Image (cartoon, helix red, strand yellow):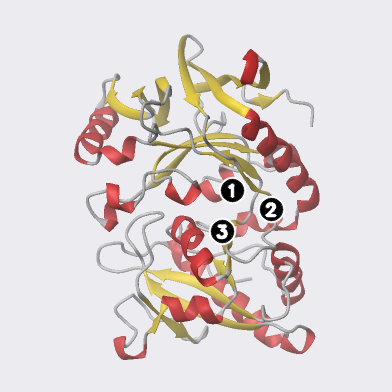
Amino acid sequence: MLAGGMMERLKAAELVAMIERVFEPQEGDERVAVLVDRPDGALPDNDAWELRRTIAADWVRELRSGSADHRFEVDLVVYRNVRANNADLPETAWLCDPDSLPASADGPDPSTATTFAEILDTHRLVLAPTELSATAPLKVLSKIHSCRGATMPGFSPAMVPALRLDYTEVNRRVHLLKNLLDRAVAADLRFVVDGDDTYDLHLDLRHRTAHASGGLLPEPGTAGNLPSGEAYIVPYEGELDGDPTSTAGTFPVQMDDEVVLFEIEGNVATSILSDGPVSKKEADLLRDEPARGNIAELGLGVLAAFGLEPIGVVLLDEKLGLHVAFGRSEHFGGQVGPERFSSPEAVIHQDHVYLSKIQPRINAAAVDLQFEGGEKLALIRDGDYVYPF
C-alpha cells in the first residue's frame, strides 16, 4: 500500500500490459516519460495531488525494477504547474529521481532543466497523471514531435479498475458513436431541472468531424485521456463567412447546490439568466473572459455501461455519459485557442457531466441527433442511452 491510503496499485506486469495495449509500441518506442506537475505558491499542494505524484513515482520504480522483463526505459518528468486545466505546458521540465521528488516547483535547479521539446523528441510514449489537465497542449505537441500521450489529469487509485476494462469493446462502442456524430448536422438536448422546468439547447454540428477516444493510441502524433471511453465533437463555431452557427438555447449547469442558467447565442454563453452567488460569479467570469463561454465540446461517454460509477474526477466521470464543455476547442478541431484568453492562466476547457450523482437537480431528459434530409435519431432518454449498441 502506498502512502495516502492507496488501496490498489499497478505492478510492473500490469503497467507493461497497459502500455502495450494503449500504444501498441513499435520499434523506436522504447522510451517512456511519466509527467507530473508540481505545486507552487500560486497553486498549493493537496493530499490527492501528493498521492498522485507518489503513484507516478511508484510506476517509474516498478517499471525500472522489472526492466529485465520488458524493453521500456522510463523517466519521471517534473514541471511547474501551469495554473489552469489545458493551459500550454512550460518550456522546460526536469528529469527526476522517483525516490527524491522535489518538495515544490521551486526545488529543482533551473540549470539542470531540459526543454519540453527535447523530452517529447526523445520519449515517444507519454503518461501524464497530472493535477491539471495536459490534454489540450499534448494533442498539439504530439503532432509536432510524433509522440503519443495518454493524459490522466486527476488520476486516483479509484480509477485503477477502469484501466483493466475490455477496451476492445469500449473502442467498438465509441466508434459507433463517432460515426453517428460524423453524420449528424445537429444535436438537440433537453434538460429538466428539479423535475419541472425544461430547457432546450440546439448544437450545430455541421462542418465538423468527431473524435473517438476509445483507450487505444496506436498512431504517432496522437494524445488522449486514459481511462478512456468517449466520442466527442466540437459544435460549429461560425467561423465561415456568411454561414453563422445555429447553436443556441439555454444551458443549465449545477454548480454546488445552485443551477446556473447560461443563455447561448451563436455557440457562446452571452449572459446568465439565473440568480444567486454562483450565477453572479459566473457572470463576472464571462464578462472578464468571454472565451470561457464558447461551447467547446459535445461528449458521449460509454463507461457507465461497464459498471463504473462517478468518483468526482472529470477524467473518469466524463467517460461515463453525456457531457458538454466550455472554453478552449482548437485541440479538438475547433477555432478557440489560448490566444483568445487574456493570459495563459485564464485558458480553460471545462466539462460538465450530466449524471444524477454529479448534477442531481438536472435530468438530461433527451438527446436527439439530426441528419441530412431531416432524419432524427433518439440517442439518450433520462440520462441513459436508448441507442442499441
Mark 1 / mark 2, whichever is N-terminal: 2
Which one is in front, 90 or 237?
237
Which residue bears the numbered disc 1? 316
Q: Is residue 25 left or right of residue 47?
A: right
Q: Position of residue 96 (x, y in %)?
A: 47, 85
Mark 1 / mark 3, whichever is N-terminal: 3
Secondary structure state at the residue bearing disc 2:
helix
Q: What whole-number distance in Å separates the C-alpha atoms at marks 1 and 2? A: 8 Å
Circle 3/circle 2 CB separation < 8 Å? no
Which one is in front, 310 or 294?
294
Tell me which residue sits at (31%, 64%) in the image.
44
Q: Position of residue 200 (x, y in %)?
A: 47, 16
Q: Position of residue 244 (x, y in %)?
A: 38, 25
Which residue bears the numbered disc 3? 156
Which residue bears the numbered disc 2? 162
Q: Residues within 10 Å of mark 3 (few under 14, many from 20)?
A: many
